[in-house]
Image: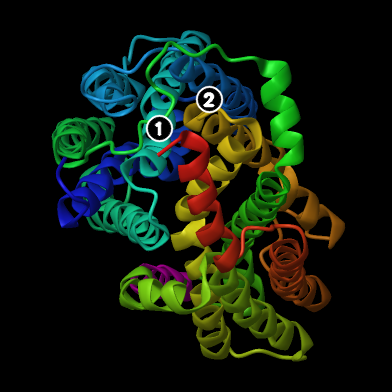
Amino acid sequence: MRPFGNRDRVGYMFGDLANDLFFVYMATYLMLFYTDIMGISGHAVGVMFLVVRLWDALCDVAIGSFIDSRKPSPEGKFRPYLIRFSVPISVLGVLCFTYFPSMSEQMALVYAYLTYMVYGTLYSCVNIPYGSLASAITSNPLERTSLSTYRTLGAAIANIVIAFTVPKLIFDVNNVPQAGGFLTAAVLFAVLSVIFYYGSYKLTTERITAGYDEVPRVDWGETVRGMLRNRSLIAFIIASIIMLTVNFLMASLNPYLFKDYFKNGELLSWMTLIVLPVSFILLPTVKPLVARFGKKEVAAGALILTFVSNLLLFSLPHVNPWVYLAFQFLSLIGLGYITMLTWALVADIIDYHEYITGKRQEGTVYSVYSFARKLGQALSGGLAGFALGAIGYVQGLAEQPPEVAHRIKQVITIVPATGSLAIIVLLALVYNLSKERVEKLLVELEAQRGH
């Protein structure tokens, strides 16, 4: 069998690039398409997003258990799904951004529900096997770290492509969104996604095949009991929900911060400019740091930078926008490490689950983790709105009172500070897969598998 190398890294990066071309496009622009092109009310769109994300979360668990209940094909347990669903998911992505002028608002809402829910189901059919694939490509901790960093790099590339192409396609000279532009972008991303899914399938190799000789049966009672004993899984699910909540709140409140506190909404574009380079700056440092200290140790240590940066911003009575951006750059470096290491940590958690239960259930474990993330996304959807209401924000005012603007600054800094501290505590005291434990775990698994 071909040894692990750059071919696997690039192939795994292609998988997330294919996923995120549409995922990020939808996360950023689908609501605008629904409201400004299809004429659906913002309230109806918000309810739809909540319903569809809950549906997606359930689909993740169903798909994960389905994969684990099937005997792998000669091409592998996970890779074939990238090919089987690459065209259907790309077609549904295009249909999500297809506008029919003759539709009433009610029919448009039904069409939006139908296409978005089917797309979400198909996304589970490729994302769950893709996410599980990392644990089957290699068992080496450093090699898994490189897969995780390349996956993050693929997401960064997708974000850059979308940031530089979509606004030029969808807005006319008067800054008005055009239906044809949305469709053109969707077709472009559909073609690219199919190409990158194929590249991911061709370039990666599944090497960890223990327990695949017979068709397994998923016993959910036994699986759940194993997961409840897997303290690393529980700790990381809670940590991921906290991290998603922090990221969502910051993304939602930053426009209000720059508009009402800094009195300069145009400076918000600088937030994007400091976010994009972080992945490229961190990429060469992740592997040597993990080799020296370990994955959970690097993630927890880097988050200290996020905690200190935001605590200092919270403590300062008045903050200059450039000072805020400088501290946020440091904060994002801290968050960047755990983001890059997330999928390597999940692969270790899958190994630990096999050690506890004696069964290799990559799809099921990954899908439960994904379910928790999506549930967190759905439940945190209204958090920013509740926060604005709690601090006294008055919609429609040309200028908010100074005390309200100050509270926005306090919320947007104290939440990341407390959130990062909570994740540090979870990683240090509950997540039990340290560098030494992971190394020992791999030896124990080899013996357990009879190798």
Crowd tier of the residue under label 2, counting other residues whose Cα lies within 10 Å: few below 14, some 14–19, many 20 or above: many
Q: Which residue bears the numbered disc 1?
A: 127
Taking the magenta stretch, the answer to whether it contains residue 276 is yes
29 relative position to 365: left or right: left
The answer to whether the residue labelled 2 contacts the one labelled 1, judged by CB atoms less than 8 Å apart, is yes
Query: Which residue is rendered at x = 46% and y = 51% of the image?
Result: 343
Q: Position of residue 344 (x, y in %)?
A: 46, 54
Specify the quadrant of the image occupied by residue 300.
bottom right
- The image's colour scheme reads rainbow
Q: Main secondary structure of the magenta part?
A: helix
Closer to the camera in the image, 336 or 192: 336
Q: Position of residue 347 (x, y in %)?
A: 48, 46
Q: What amino acid does circle 2 point to?
A: Asp
4 relative position to 50: left or right: left
Q: What amino acid does circle 1 point to?
A: Asn
Query: Which residue is rendered at x = 47% and y = 25% of the image?
Result: 39
Crowd tier of the residue under label 1, counting other residues whose Cα lies within 10 Å: few below 14, some 14–19, many 20 or above: many
Q: Which residue bears the numbered disc 2?
A: 60
Closer to the camera in the image, 86 or 328: 86
Q: Which residues are magenta?
A: 267-278
Q: Position of residue 264 (x, y in %)?
A: 53, 77
Q: Position of residue 419 (x, y in %)?
A: 73, 65
Q: Determine whether 181 is above or below 58 in the image.
A: below
